[in-house]
Image (cartoon, rainbow, N blue to C red):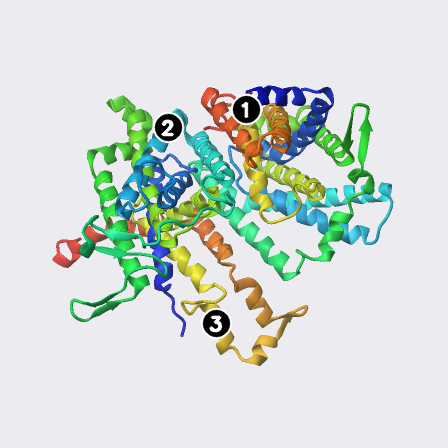
Amino acid sequence: MAGFVDALGRFLRPQNLAAVFVDGLAKAAIYVMIAGGLTLIFGLMGVLNFAHGSMTMIGAYLGGLIMIALVGGGVGFGANLLFFFVALAATFALLAGLGGVVEVGLIRRLYDRPPVYQILLTFGLTLILDELVRIAVLFYGMQPSSDWQSALGTKPSALAASVDLGIVSVSGLSLFEIAFGTATVAGLWAFLTRTRYGMIIRAGSEDAEMTEALGIDVRRVFTVVFALGAGVAGAAGTLLMWDPAWGASVPLAADTLLPAFVVVIIGGLGTFRGTVVAAVIVGMTDATMTWWFVNEIDFAGLPEMTIFLILVVMLVLRPQGLFGVEEVGGH
Amino acid sequence: MVTLLPDVETMIAVLYFGLFAMSFDFISGYTGYLSFGHAAFYGAGAYFVVLASNGKIPFVATSTSFVVLLVLAGLVAVVLALLIGAVSFRLSGVYFAMITLGFSQVLYVFVRGWDYAASNPRDGPAVLERTDPFSVGVPGVDSLNLAIGQLAGDSVEGFLGFLNFGTTEVSYYMIGLVVLVCYFAMQRIIHSPFGRVLVAIRENEERAEAVGYDTFWYKLGAFAVSAFFAAVAGGLFAGFQRSVSPESTFYFLVTGDALLASIIGGFGTLAGPLYGWLFDESVTEFLSKTGEGGGLLPYLREHLGEATMTTELWNGLTVGRAIDTFLNGHAELYIGVVFVLFVLFVPNGLLGTVRDRLGGPVGKQVAARLRGDGK
């Protein structure tokens, strides 16, 4: 017990807390990126997209490939960052296209069936997408090869270095991730609340039938939202490609899918605000537990296990999530 | 020669994993509650058998007979299922799938870091203490026991005077015996009044409640029964392989495989998942690298001439390379495609569709037609 009190004392030191806080924010930014699209899709369409993780994983590979193609040799920080945004936009567009095709070609056929079938279909889709990527990676010999290492090398050196913030020094990448995640949240928020199309999407998730009656083609809105969700997943992948804790790999699909589920469920399936809050909760928990694992408790699964425990506790106490309503998307 | 059916070693995997898929279908196909964390019970059974054989379970001797171990593993899973189910059955639909997934991932992450289970918990434990093979049969009667195992099992010579079985064949029949007994037990339960209530819950839970059934206890009971058989399946897997890993037992994709088997074989048909998994394993075997059962790859390599193999298809991609790229060990891709096609076009699965065509369970219909009192 005394050992625990001592450890708690070490944990509560200001510089520790600050470091954990920044780390938590960076993790929250990643979580909100990988879960944001999932919650949009569920909120409007009631489809729990099991293929979301695969979209993120494909985004990571595509982003990396585009960066390799663009950057080639070493260039400066500004140009590198510019190329990153080009790669990001391209990945977003490609994944959004894929998402649109999937919705029109496959998911559209299942709306009049029980929701379980949508889970089943998207689960099958992950098998196909993951295997296709695995085939491509093997065929082109991308990993492990020095070519692919250069994708990691496209990360501007400023992001790898640490930045001094008074009481703590944090890695530039963490700050970049926080900025990136905030920008995504702000962008989606503005899109949903400040644009006409966002209004239609919100109306569609409140009451699809009524929206239809007002003369809006909800089917097309579904396609747009599915494409948007897939695009955001792809953008998240591009970000993860640079992060040494994640990186592009085929198992990234499952590794991102499960935390994304946890985040959307804690927040309340289908509520965007809940997803943002839940991402912060999960990110902070992850950062805190990572600190305890690194410094005090010798159990490698600690952060991951705590996150799933939060999920279970949340579902027991409040099944609809933090901001969820009992009936979402007809479930 | 191309063999379409998998060899006997693959068939053993079909049997024990088929049993797991059946137990998954028992709860998910019959009550409609998608138990996405069912791997927890499979894993619990597998780990129980290995840990008990290493003397790491208190009060369970290392030399306990395998059949007793299987039953004990099943009971452990029942306790686990009652704990998980008591919480989870307050939810339904997507939320139920997610909370069971959450529980199984907690266990998966825990087992992956638990150094009591194995010195390297990420790779999982192996049977180290117990040297004698696991045997299936009547406990305590040596002449009614036959050992299973990849290399360690028994072989039988001169059964009924002329039948000879190697070690894998004995394992195949003995594991098959356990699976068959489990199948009949589940079949019996499904066709009992208890099982009828489960189907009523699947069709319309509110109405089942209105009729006066306390559906919570029925669901919990079905969950526990299903967990029991999932653990037996896990125990058979551990007993045959003598080593387990977190990835092959507790991971959520293991449940995914059971789901695959159930959909292809027929959701809500107890025997369907076994056929579904047989299909899956056959495709995997047919496209495997070595093609031990005489799969497609060796056949193509043997029969396509050198000229064909080096023909360029597109941009430097030769036929040989294309075969390697798209066929070599990528069964998952084709199984995924088949799975999606089944979800879209054959929602009742293989067995369900056959039943629909015949107008009832296959056995009954065939018997009726043989007797001549069919339609």
> Which residue is at the front of the view, B273 or A26?
A26
Q: Is residue A84 above or below residue B298?
A: above
User: Which three-letter amino acid code belongs to the residue tagged 1?
Assistant: Glu
Position of the N terminus of chain B by quadrant: bottom left
Is there any visible trace of residue B134 in the rendered image? yes
Tag of residue B298: 3
Q: Position of residue A301 (x, y in %)?
A: 55, 36
- CA gap between label 1 and label 2 equals 36 Å
Q: Tell whether A70 sits left or right of B183.
A: right
Of badges 1 and 3, nearer the viewer stands: 3
- CA gap between label 1 and label 3 equals 57 Å
Tag of residue B83: 2
Of badges 1 and 2, nearer the viewer stands: 2
* Residue designated by label 1: A206
Q: Tell whether A110 sits left or right of B372.
A: right
Q: Position of residue B93 (x, y in %)?
A: 42, 31
Sequence-first disc among 3 and 2: 2
Q: Position of residue A171 (x, y in %)?
A: 76, 34
- CA gap between label 3 and label 2 equals 49 Å
